[in-house]
Image (cartoon, grey):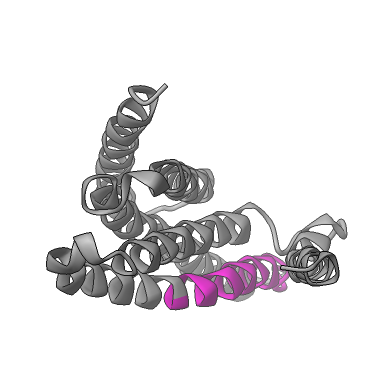
Amino acid sequence: MSDASQADSKTGVSQSIGTFAELVAEGTPTPGGGSVSAYCGVLAASLGQMVCAITKSKPKYAAAEPRLREIASALENSAARLRELITDDAASFESVLIAYRMPKESEEQKSARAIEIQKALKHAIAVPMETAERSLAVLKLVAELADAGTPNALSDVAVGTQLARVAVTGASYNVGINLSSITDRKWADTTRENLDSIIDQSSAIAARVDEKMKAQR
């Protein structure tokens, strides 16, 4: 590649990463941590897709190609939904703000406001819960590439698993911060149990890949 081509390539990469980061930095409440968490899931899926492509290009991995294609397809689908969740998270936060701004002069207004707040909070929890679930699915697929993928890309797999774990953890923060405000305690407890299971799984899977990576030092 010529020096000019290398320069163009570097410029293209630099320009492509700026927009979302700039939106986060603007100082507005959204996009915030929930959207960033979903974006980490997207990046994790993208790294997994890259490793699949690199591995498939090597003749020695011909036998693994069908599974690699399955993994790449599943990662592409998960990434597409996580991209939607970036926007959904911001929208759910706005819905909570709108509910809290509802009038509360009369008892009827207070009752209507309380109902809408609970509905908005449940939705604001459901979005990052799905981010956590989707990111765990991405984590499992990317972690599989620690064995199925080319060893030359193990560091990319390791980065991908850590990003997916961050996506899970970040999403869990956005779930947890709203759970205490839910009046339906049975629903809240069930959600918390499901979330704890997702967190535990993600930590264990990421730790296994991390150990495999450390063994290469």
Q: Judge left or right: residue 211 versus residue 40.
A: left
Q: Position of residue 136 (x, y in %)?
A: 32, 53
Magenta stretch: includes residue 119: no
Q: Position of residue 37 (x, y in %)?
A: 55, 54
Residue at image location 46% in from the left, 48% down from the top: 156
Q: Residue furthest front?
A: 2
Name the image quarter holding the N terminus: bottom right
Q: Judge left or right: residue 63 versus residue 201.
A: left
Residue at image location 37% in from the left, 26% down from the top: 216
| Residue 192 sits above or below residue 97 on the image | above
Q: Position of residue 132 (x, y in %)?
A: 39, 55
Residue at image location 43% in from the left, 76% down from the top: 81
Q: Between 27 and 66, which is closer to the camera in this rendering?
A: 66
Looking at the rendering, which quadrant does residue 68 occupy?
Answer: bottom left
Looking at the rendering, which quadrant does residue 66 occupy?
Answer: bottom left
Q: Judge left or right: residue 27 versus residue 130.
A: right
Q: Between 79 and 110, which is closer to the camera in this rendering?
A: 79
| Residue 120 sits above or below residue 172 on the image | below
Q: Between 5 and 183, which is closer to the camera in this rendering?
A: 5
Residue at image location 49% in from the left, 47% down from the top: 163
Q: Between 215 and 124, which is closer to the camera in this rendering?
A: 215
The stretch in magenta equals 80-104
